[in-house]
Each structure stands twice: as C-alpha cells, then as structure tokens.
C-alpha cells in the first residue's frame, strides 16, 4: 500500500507543496549530487556504494535481489534487520513490500480468467450483486474488474481511519471493506482517468474468494507462492520462530513502528525476503514460467504490463498502469516495468526490463523515499551499463494549429484523495507553451520541463525512447482540451487563463494576508511594549479590532501546522482521534466561524482619521475578506469540520 497517502495529506494540511503532471526521472541521492553519476561497474562496487548510502542516510537495513529470467545474480541483505538488539539483514530477512503486493491479485485473476471462471471485463455486479458502491454511469459504463485492477474506477482512496486500523485478529476481506464504504463513489466515468485506489485490489480479491470458496491468502499460497517458490512470503504477521522479520523504523533509524496489520491485505500486506522476491521477478521475466513451471502464458503477463482502460492508453501512450504492474520511462531511454510500495517505515521497489531479461527487487526498513530512489539509481545503473541505450524516436513537428489549440493552463482532474484536492487543484496548475517544435510545461511554483514531439499530439522528454505525454480531446468527459501523462501520471484539463490567474491571485493574496497576520502578531505587541516603555498611551485606531481579529484567524490557520509539527502526521495521529486530528477538526470550524465574525466586523468599520489609519483599515478589511473567501473554499472542498478519524 503506497505510503504516499499520509505524506501527501500531511503536506496538504501543513505546507504548500507541488503536484506536478510531469513524470520525473530518477534523481541522484544527496550523497551523489556533488558529482556526475557514474554507475557501478562491478557487483563489488555496487555493494560498497549501497553500504555507504545506507550508512550516510542512517538507513538500518535493506534487502536486494538481482535476477535474470533463468538465474539469480545476487540475493542478499545489507545493514541491520533490527537495531536493538542488533540483527544483521540477510537474503532470508522478511521486509514489508507494500503495494508491490498488488500484482498477486492480478496474477490470480488472470489465472481464473484462463480457467473460464471470470473475465476481467466482468462488471462487479456479476460476482458481487449486493456489494455497495455508487456509480452515476453504471447503466452505460459499469465498473468492471479491469477498472479495479488498473485504478480507473474513479473511487476515492481509503480514508485515514481505515489506514489507521491495525486489528491483529485479523479482519476478513469483507470486514476490512466494510470499515469505510463512503470512498466507493465514482467521481468520473469509469474507464477514463487513472487515480490510485487501494480498494480496487481488495474488491477483486473478494470476487476471487467468492469464486474459489476459500480465503484469498490460501488461494495465493496454493496458486502462486508455492509454485513460484516464495517459501517464506506471507500476508500475515510472520512466524518469527521460523523466519527473521525486519523491524521498521522512523526516519531517525532508531525508533521502531509497530507492526501494521493491513485492513485489506491484498492491497499491500506481504512480507517477503530477497530470496522470495528473486523468484517472483524471475517469474515475470520468464513471461509466466519459472523452472519449467507454467503459471500463465506469455500473453497474460504482457497484458498485465499494458494499460488499456484509461483515456491515456486509448490515446496511444504505452507508459501507464496495467493490471497492478506499470511501465515508466526515464531520460536514460530505458522503459521499466514493475511496482513500488510502502508502509510506515518500509519501502520497496520491484522493476525489470522484459526485453533485456533482467530485473531487481529491493526493500528498506525506513520510510525515506530518497534513499530508495538512490538505491534504484545505483542498481539500474549497474544493470543497464553494458546495455545499448534505446534509440530516441525521430523528432516530429508541431503544427501551428495544435500549438494554438493546446497552449495554456491545465489543472489536474484525477485526485487520488478528494480531501487533498483543494490544494492540488491550485498548486498542480501547469502552463503549457510552445516555441517552434519544443513544448515547455512550467509548474506554478517553478520548474520547467521540456518536451519534444513524437507527433503532433504525443510528446517525450529529451532522452526518452517513447512518448510520455499526450493531448486529448475528451468532450464526453467535460474536457474539450486535455492532457494525459503516462507512467504514474495524471489527467489534466485545460482551464482559461482568466480562471487560473484569478485563483492564483486569490491564493497568493490570502498567503500575503496570513503573512500580514503573522507580522501583526509580532509587531503589535512590540509596538505596545515600546509605547509603554516610553510612557505613551496607545492611540485609538479604527483598524485595531480588525487586525486583532486577523491575528486570531492566522493563529487558527497555523494551529494544524503546529499540531503536526509537534505530534506528527503519521497514520496513528491522523486516522484516530488524537491531539493532531482534533486540532485539524476544531481549528477548521473555529476558522470558519471567526472568518464570518471578522467579515461582519470589517463591514461595521467605516471611517479612520488620517491617511495611514485609512490604509490600515482597508488592509485589515482586505485580509478579513480573504479569510472569508478561504473559509468558503475550504468548506466547499470538505476541509472545514473534517474528521480525519471518521
């Protein structure tokens, strides 16, 4: 289950962040950023650089498997599986692999399809007639199994309350899915936009349970783990008397997280070792066959690697999310297939090059994404160093009509978490412009990515071997002009320059108003103290009540930020009633009420003697008006009175 959910939520509540529609290449780790990246030339050098990276970033341990379809190049552990008492990580150490678990649901579904027990084109209702969800387009566009596997159902992702659930009982699939039904509402026509949702694989797993008449974990054990040779992999808490389990740690590398009993295990609960993962990657590289055992034919594995149900796929993008496997590209030209994942304190990445017949799987026991990214860069560099770099396609041209039609502002319209969309829809704004046969995409907060045309509607970054972005005309789904990003990208809709400018201006003005409130919090007491020391009485001011009200509003805006800074923004704090979640809830309601009060107060102040007093009065009115607009906006998107634990 992808760890990004909590991180994105924390960002949305605590500080401005950026949501970019542009796929980012692997970036060098901080330890390598001072010099050009040179990939390891030997296995010994790779091991040494991995150890240096783990030591320099205080990452306790890692597991790594590097394989070909017919052999294991390397399987081992680095550092410590447990810090205190110290236990070294080995090839047999079990790490959490998070959402890398999802593909086993797709593998099982493809096996049942091969046996005629289901079709991935079946609507949910065919197998789960009483299962609750809401889809306004159900009559013409029902939610199908393929939509759940490719994350194109339109469902919101799980709530914080369900993420925080950690019942060791453990819950059945039906019990886990019953914890929160409100997110199972299609926000757009199914089979159009990609939006990552952890509920999907759990619903498919429930269908598989109903068909097979046994628990999903048992089905995977019999159909996949045992035949593949994943001897120690398990969805449940491991038997530590038989196998070694890695402890998961906070960013300091010393404070452990409690074990998370995932409430819908098919979405991301597997514990697996480097040895287990080596077998799994070999199956995928073997196109469904491992050691002469055929679990699926080649065409089924290739279908899993291919996205088909989204508009991006239908627009011709070959990068995208398939059946719980996805294809991404970076500017080295190589196109990787795989999946990553994470839980609090544990991250994983499984990637491979089908054409070259090589791949890897890695896990770490700390939730530091930059470390995993740096590890992936080292391993990918080592694997691709002897390979010829894929050729870039010929550069196309951009007709003037296309440049005119698609230039402008674009907004993301496929949010993963609807509650975070209030921030994403503004900070995710992108400006598309053309200069000759070059397209540039500039984010609102800076950063420009250059693209070159493959043809008039498909574009790639220099160095990429395939298109990673496509323009679409999607009238049926209220996007006369749209933009689709491949890989783990987004759907974007064009918005008018007037709308974008107005929203940016209002958001910027509100931030300035918050800064003004902070300055008032600092300067007003200082001014009062200075006048008192000089024994001068404070002069009456028409603006003073307004600025006092603005200062209180600023404190209410900053209260959730302070609560997160002090109490943390982890699953436990946000998904349960805690000081952090109660502050988010209470401060939101108080901010809305106080903003209404401030607006009324501002309307009642009509005169101020003197130029500066008048200016102060009008500034105070402006700040309070902006707070009222912000409160209305936050209320519209569900942030006022949001019970993150509910």
Image (cartoon, helix red, strand yellow):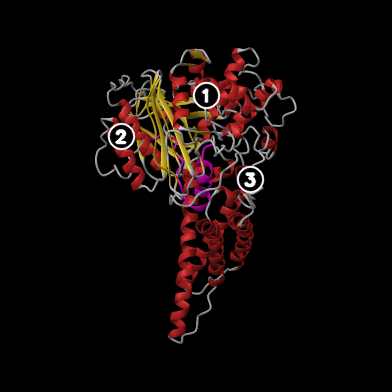
Q: Mark 2 points at which residue?
A: 46
Give percent across and percent down for residue 121: 62, 18
Residue placed most toward the observer, 580 or 419: 580
- Which residue is painted at 58% across and 38% down in the image? 237
Give percent across and percent down for residue 322: 51, 23
The local secondary structure at tag 1 comes to: helix
Give percent across and percent down for residue 2: 52, 37
Residue at mark 2 to residue at mark 3: CA–CA distance: 41 Å
Residue interval drawn in magenta: 1-24
In the shown orientation, is residue 274 left or right of residue 234?
A: left
Residue at mark 3 to residue at mark 1: CA–CA distance: 32 Å
Q: Name the residue under label 1.
A: 311
- Say if residue 188 shows up in the picture: no
Tell whether label 3 touches label 2 (CB within 8 Å): no
Q: Name the residue under label 3.
A: 161
The local secondary structure at tag 3 comes to: helix
């Amino acid at each position: 289950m992808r760890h990004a959910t909590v991180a994105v939520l924390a960002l949305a509540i605590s500080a401005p962040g950026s949501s970019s529609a542009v796929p980012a290449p692997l970036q060098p780790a901080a330890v390598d950023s001072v010099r050009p990246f040179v990939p390891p030339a030997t296995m010994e050098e790779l091991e040494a650089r991995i150890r240096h990276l783990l030591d320099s970033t205080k990452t306790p341990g890692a597991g790594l498997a590097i394989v070909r379809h017919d052999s294991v190049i390397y399987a081992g552990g680095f550092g410590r599986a447990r810090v205190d008492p110290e236990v070294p990580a080995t090839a047999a150490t079990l790490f959490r692999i998070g959402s890398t678990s999802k593909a086993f649901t797709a593998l099982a579904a493809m096996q049942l399809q091969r046996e005629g027990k289901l079709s991935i084109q079946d609507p949910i209702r065919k197998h789960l007639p009483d299962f609750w969800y809401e889809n306004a387009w159900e009559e013409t566009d029902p939610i199908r199994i393929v939509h759940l596997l490719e994350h194109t159902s339109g469902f919101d992702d799980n709530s914080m309350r369900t993420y925080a659930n950690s019942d060791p009982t453990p819950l059945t699939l039906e019990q886990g899915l019953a914890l929160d039904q409100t997110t199972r509402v299609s926000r757009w026509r199914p089979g159009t936009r990609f939006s990552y949702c952890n509920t999907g694989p759990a619903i498919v797993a429930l269908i598989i349970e109903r068909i097979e008449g046994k628990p999903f974990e048992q089905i995977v054990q019999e159909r996949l783990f045992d035949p593949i040779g994943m001897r120690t992999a398990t969805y449940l808490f491991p038997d530590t008397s038989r196998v070694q389990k890695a402890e998961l740690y906070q960013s300091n590398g010393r404070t452990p997280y409690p074990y998370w009993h995932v409430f819908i295990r098919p979405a991301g609960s597997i514990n697996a070792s480097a040895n287990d993962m080596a077998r799994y990657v070999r199956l995928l590289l073997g196109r469904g066959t491992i050691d002469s055992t055929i679990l699926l034919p080649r065409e089924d594995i290739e279908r899993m690697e291919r996205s088909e149900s989204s508009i991006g796929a239908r627009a011709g993008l070959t990068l995208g999310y398939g059946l719980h496997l996805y294809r991404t590209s970076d500017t080295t030209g190589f196109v990787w297939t795989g999946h990553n994942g994470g839980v609090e304190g544990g991250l994983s990445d499984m990637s491979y090059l089908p054409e070259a017949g090589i791949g890897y799987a890695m896990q770490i026991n700390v939730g530091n994404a930059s470390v995993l990214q740096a590890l992936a860069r080292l391993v990918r560099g080592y694997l691709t160093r002897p390979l010829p770099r894929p050729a870039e396609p010929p550069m196309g041209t951009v007709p003037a009509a296309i440049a005119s039609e698609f230039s402008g502002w674009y907004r993301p319209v496929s949010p993963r978490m609807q509650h975070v969309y209030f921030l994403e829809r503004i900070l995710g704004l992108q400006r598309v412009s053309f200069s000759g046969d070059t397209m540039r995409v500039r984010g609102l907060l800076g950063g420009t990515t250059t693209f070159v045309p493959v043809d008039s509607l498909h574009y790639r970054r220099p160095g990429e071997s395939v298109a990673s972005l496509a323009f679409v005309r999607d009238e049926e789904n209220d996007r006369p002009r749209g933009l689709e990003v491949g890989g783990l990208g987004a759907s974007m809709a064009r918005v008018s320059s007037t709308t974008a400018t107005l929203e940016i201006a209002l958001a910027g003005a509100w931030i300035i108003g918050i800064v003004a409130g902070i300055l008032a919090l600092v300067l007003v007491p200082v001014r009062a103290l200075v006048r008192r020391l000089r024994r001068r009485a404070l002069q009456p001011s028409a603006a003073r009540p307004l600025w006092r009200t603005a200062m209180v509003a600023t404190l209410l805006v900053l209260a959730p930020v302070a609560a997160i800074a002090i109490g943390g923004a982890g699953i436990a704090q946000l998904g349960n009633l805690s000081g952090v979640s109660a502050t988010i809830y209470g401060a939101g309601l108080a901010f809305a009420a106080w903003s209404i009060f401030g607006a009324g107060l501002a309307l009642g102040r009509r005169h101020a003697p003197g130029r500066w007093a008048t200016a102060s009065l009008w500034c105070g009115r402006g700040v309070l008006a902006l707070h009222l607009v912000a409160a209305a906006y936050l209320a519209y998107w569900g942030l006022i009175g949001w019970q993150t634990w509910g």
